Amino acid sequence: MRSEESVEIDRPPEEVFYYVANPENLPEWTNMVLEVRKDAEGQPQEGDRFSVVAKFLGRRFETPFEVSAHEPPREHADRSTGGPFEQEFIYTFEQTGDGKTRLTQVVETEPGGFFRLVGPLLERAGSRQLKADLQSLKDLMEAHAEN
């Protein structure tokens, strides 16, 4: 399954990139992420590992991830290395003509077990959640800039 959504954020690409690429910020803008544990300190780099505790469709699960791409300020990607299903989150950052950032998030998943049984429901719920999370990110980053 593949979902793709974009949002325009009134912040420069570098600022959006470094905020989004830091997995410790996920609980602030991603509704289903409850907790993140990083294996390494500092700014993420390709190959870094972290774990996410999330709740989705009423189930709580932990998934280990690895940073699979980190090219500031253009692209960042995280790929699961275990958990209930394979997933990859790919973020691309483009500067618009007016200095804003167009952030595109692509989520590719291969559900297994319980999640395979609810595939169509998973796809619809995931797409709605992706759109809501990007709107939360936009609101958070733009409100933070005003303070």
Image (spheres, rainbow, N blue to C red):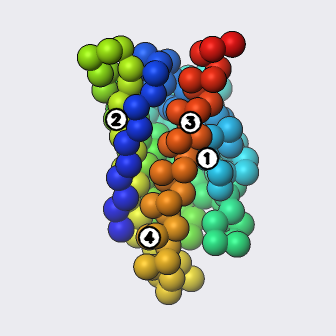
Task: Return the residue at label 1.
Answer: 30
Q: Quadrant of the N terminus?
A: bottom left
Task: Return the residue at label 2.
Answer: 92
Residue at 26% x, 17% y: name it: 97
Q: Earlier in the sequence, mark 1 or mark 4?
A: 1
Q: Secondary structure at mark 4?
A: helix
Question: Could you tell me the amino acid type at mark 3?
Answer: Leu
Q: Secondary structure at mark 3?
A: helix
27 or 11, nearer to the observer: 11
Marks 3 and 4 sit apart, C-alpha to C-alpha, by 21 Å
Residue 136 visible to the viewer? yes
Question: Could you classify mark 2 by the number of other residues whose Cα lies within 10 Å: few (under 14), some (14-19), or many (20 or more)?
Answer: many
Question: Could you classify mark 3 by the number of other residues whose Cα lies within 10 Å: few (under 14), some (14-19), or many (20 or more)?
Answer: many
Residue at 34% x, 62% y: name it: 2
Q: Secondary structure at mark 1?
A: loop
Task: Return the residue at label 4.
Answer: 123
Examine the image and state in which quarter residue 53 appears: bottom right
Task: Return the residue at label 3.
Answer: 137
129 to the left or right of 127 = right
Q: Nearer the viewer, mark 2 or mark 3?
A: 3
* In the depicted structure, whether residue 76 falls above or below residue 89: above
Q: Secondary structure at mark 2?
A: strand
Q: Nearer the viewer, mark 4 or mark 2?
A: 4
Q: Are marks 2 and 3 in contact (CB under 8 Å)?
A: no
Q: Position of residue 19 (x, y in %)?
A: 55, 26
